[in-house]
Amino acid sequence: MSIFVTSLLLTPLSLRLPPLRCCAEDFVPPALKGAEQFARGAIGRGSWWRQDPQRLQIVVALPEGASFSRDVSVELSRKRIQLAVAGTTVLDGSLAHEAVSTESEWFVEEEPDGFERARYLVMDIKKSESFLDWAAPLEGAAAVRRVLIGGKGPVQKQATAQQLASYQVLQKLPSAQRGDVYVHASPGAGGMPSDLFYFVGKVISEVASAPASLATQAVLVRQHARLYLPDVFGAVENDDAIELWLAPGNTEMKVAQNMLPLVRWVPPESAQLPSAGECGFEPETKPPPHMGTNVGPFAVKRDANGQPLSAAFEAKVVKPDEVPGTYEKWLEKQ
């Protein structure tokens, strides 16, 4: 999670504020639900900003007796914002990224989530690019472009559905670049590193390499690993402790036969990362019930460099309906 307390050289918001806990100089606004990894911070005394994948939210404590129609002035366009309350400037300048002004709104709310004992002006600014992590409301605070797809709860569920839909579209394009994603198991209880690497899904993009596509979707993939394999990764809270590894796209069989190594994923430093709509992720899921309860997740053994621990071998490939007992299981349910 990134938290930025921005210094925007604005006129302090010296309003008749009630003695609120949330107006302390070092108060950091709570994250919007499921968006804990997105940046947030203070604009000035009595004003803050936070965000989720779809919107940037500005929260301003209103003075006693303030009128929305009389004391609040807002001008919002695709690239600029002017916000003043009771004659005092809160924000004035170019936005850090583009917004959709026609789908943005502002209103007065009593005690928004995480704030107490006051009336607030709340601005919900629609992001032009979903999942883009704004480093600050205004341009110039940070030049790094960071995309965060995924999170917790509904955010993860919605992001997974969106990226799967993108994957299904992109896989039809002959120029799309694919990558199979494996996750390295966390160390065992005895402190010994595990040699198991679990297959968790596939990434794809037409405009970027597999490592760049994974960089855009790394949060989504790691959270999927926690949900898909809770016994292995569910308790691993630090994202950096969940190693991501890549193999060429659609090579599960060759990897299983120890014919291919895995390559440790390192976030690309100079490559332009694709937007959410320019990449996709197909998550690995549990085997269907008719395959039986003894079918575990697909995992391979590799050393610390991703090299196979055993010699390559040829495997006999059978169709799903040729697996012993499958037909009998199917008959039982008819």
Image (cartoon, grey):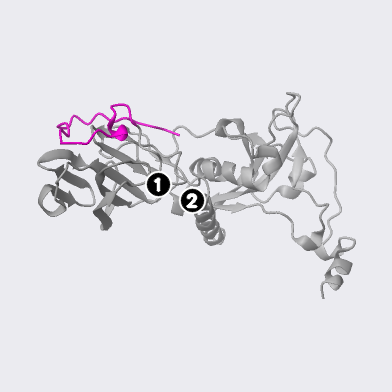
Q: Give x and y (percent) for residue 270.
A: 44, 33
- Specify the segment rendered in magenta: 1-27
Q: Is residue 3 magenta?
A: yes
| Amino acid, disc 2 | Val
- The quadrant in which the C terminus is found is bottom right
Mark carried by residue 220: none
Q: Secondary structure at mark 1?
A: loop
Instruction: For mark 2, give the secondary structure.
Output: helix
Magenta stretch, overall SS: loop
Q: Which residue is mark 1?
A: 52
Relative placement, left or right, of 102 versus 64 is right
Which is nearer the N-term, disc 1 or disc 2? 1
Q: Position of residue 145 (x, y in %)?
A: 38, 38
- Residue at far bottom of view: 334
Within the image, what quadrant is residue 19 found in? top left
Residue at 35% x, 37% y: name it: 29
**Residue 191 point in image, percent of width and height:** 73, 23
